[in-house]
Image: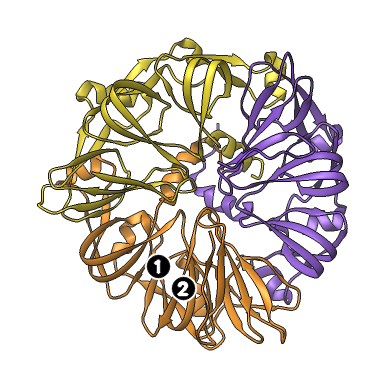
Amino acid sequence: MENTIQSATTNQLDVKFQMRPGATAAEITLKPGQKLTAEGGAMIAKSMAIQMTTSTQQKKSGGIIKGLKRLVSGENFFLNHYVAPAEGGKLWLGATHIGDMEQKELHGENLIIQGGSFVACTENVSIDASWQGFKNLVSKESLFWVKASGHGTVIFNSFGAIYKLEVDGEHIVDTGHIVAFEETLAFTLTKAGKSWVSSVLGGEGLVCKFKGKGIVWVQSHNSSSFGSTLGPQLKPR
Amino acid sequence: MNVKIEANPAFAYLDIELAPGETIVSEADAMATMSSELDMTAKFNGGFFQGISRKLLGGESMFVNHFTNNTSKSLKLTLTQATPGDMECKVLNNETYCLEGGAYVASEPGIKLGLRWAGFGSFIAREGLFKLIVKGTGKVYFGAYGGIVEREVKGEYIVDSGHLVGYEKDMQLKPKLSNGIIGSITSGEGFVTKVTGNGKIYLQTRNLSGLASWVNRHL
Amino acid sequence: MEAIHTTEGFDFKFDCKPDYGFLTVKIPNGKKIKVEAAAMASMDTNLEMKTKFKGGFKRFLSGESLFINEFTAKNGNAEIQIAPAAPGDIDHVYLNNQTIYLQNTAFVASGDEVQVDTKWQGFTKGFFSGENFFLIKCSGKGDLWFNSYGGIIPIDIDGDYVVDTGHIVAFTEDLTYTINRIGGYKSLFFSGEGLVCNFKGKGRVWIQTRKINPFVSWVHPFRPKKNNN
């Protein structure tokens, strides 16, 4: 249920994930003066003395263009910046969907996160929308992905439980199940079955084939499938 | 074949390892990840007419997917369902078992899917004219929206429509109004199902129409 | 499965916490409990159901009403299983002449002697919070079960604490609160955080790890199109 990660360096976040994997919340203990940038709308609760400001960009980089790019990637246009007071403080973050969260420490490498799954990052991590080529158009999910790079902690969320898939060679992942992947991996869109007919009749359609060596974070469930199952029972829009 | 139900009850999925020569059958669109060396073929389950009738009469998908390991090493596959929730495994030994529509996830090749007449009462209660049955020998994996709890029935028991997932083939299901005509509307309970018989039933701890009405209250 | 609790009130058990909390209550012969309308999942055939309506007609029109079904065991003990509509957690408190405020969809069930009432929050608090922020006031003596969207986390407050209005499930009456904006004016409109609840005092607030509004926005494209004829 709980997952405590002790921080070794000052830039690492003290994050405890609660209520995994059903509706995970991140319980973050900020050190005095520590800064965190989070997706708009992610805050559940906080100590009174933690300060919050809102902007279209991260403190050091980008600007309105970055905000616009994040918007098309399914993230919020605005980011919220939290600063802990001298005594430190507690901040709780949630997500739009029911599901899990993961954290990853970046040491200069790049992580590609599906649009809508970015939750928060520490000061020296930069996030930017990432165009993954025309194959984005075919995926039912979002057009852009979020690229996280730099040094520090990044937190992302999923629809469903998250499991790590260590790819060494080739592996197939359904398009609706990718949460994040290391940039050392390349992917192409392909058919799941032996033939196109089988892929279409079997309801799988197009899938992603990952190649190379690296980790893919997979979500157990597909939000579009769930939406299509629930949708017909809802009031017309 | 090594099949594990993971992340239950919140987001159950099947983590499967297929040995050389083995095959697992699944509901259409259930694959989340798979080894690129697995062979996937869409087939009518139980032949053309069964496939068509499942689609038209039972509201299920017409096709199922067969995943076969034709290599000489073991290969991996994960299967999921459209709704978040729990999964269970039922072992059949030349037996028949009843599942509510949409509950089927996957099965070993010795299991056949079919339909059974459910009666007009079931139709009036908007539960459909036909019920899904699984029969044969092997393991069947089925899923639910919400958690799955078991309940021992002795004699008779009331279950709210939409919460029943699986039951024994000899059990009688009768829809009835929960509390007269007016009471059934104001109480929000509407139709309930009276289960008669002895044995174990599986209930799901949420139901989709309940979720829909909760969302609709916020629209 | 968790074991049956024995309290001063009813024997009950929870299953599938915290993701799909499910409640089973044993009702002794002649006793009754109150259950949110439509939440009954299964029950013995010797339970009798009656529908009660809380809040009055005016409140019904403004959506701040609560239908409650009462289940009474006749001719012997009986069991009822209760499933809330929202995917999420369920929790229990035994009220000992105390008062707890619940967010408007959080009521699941209670003992017969618990008073259940709706409480209008006043124009300022209710309107600007962006939530349908009428509260359910539960007081008296007996069991109270309530539910959430997402997991429930209790936070004991001594001093002050800020909670997003959409994440409040319940709180004890000894806390006072004000609805405020967070950050500067830019944050009010663009932070996505809307308004928050500043709690003060010494007491407990139960928060939920998800809120309904983002889910409602997400589900929008999956809804059927309106037929314009």
Q: Name the outermost residue toward the top.
A: B120
Label 1, label 2: how far apart the Cα atoms are: 8 Å
Q: Amino acid at mark 1?
A: Phe
> Which lettered chain is shown in purple?
C
- The answer to whether residue B48 of the structure is visible from this angle is yes
Say which quadrant the C terminus of chain C sits in. top right
Residue at position x 26%, y 50% in the image? B77
Where C89 falls versus C179 (above or below)?
A: above
Judging by the rendered image, the residue that carries numbered circle 1 is A144
Q: Nearer the viewer, residue C155 or C1?
A: C1
Q: State which tag comes first along the sequence, 1 or 2.
A: 2
Asked which secondary structure carries label 2, the reply is helix
Q: Nearer the viewer, residue B9 or C218?
A: B9
Q: Which residue is mark 2?
A: A69
Q: Quadrant of residue B30?
A: top left
Colour of the chain lettered A = orange
Check if mark 1's residue and mark 2's residue have beta carbons within 8 Å. Answer: yes
Do pointers 1 and 2 mark residues of a single chain?
A: yes
Residue C183 in the image, given as x and y percentages of width and height: 72, 75
Asked if residue A235 shows in the view, the reply is no
* Chain B shade: yellow
- Disc 1, SS: strand
Q: Is residue C184 left or right of residue B215?
A: right
Q: Depth check: B72 or B160 in front?
A: B72
Give left or right: position of C59 versus B153: right
Q: Residue at x 60, y 72 (%)?
A: A28
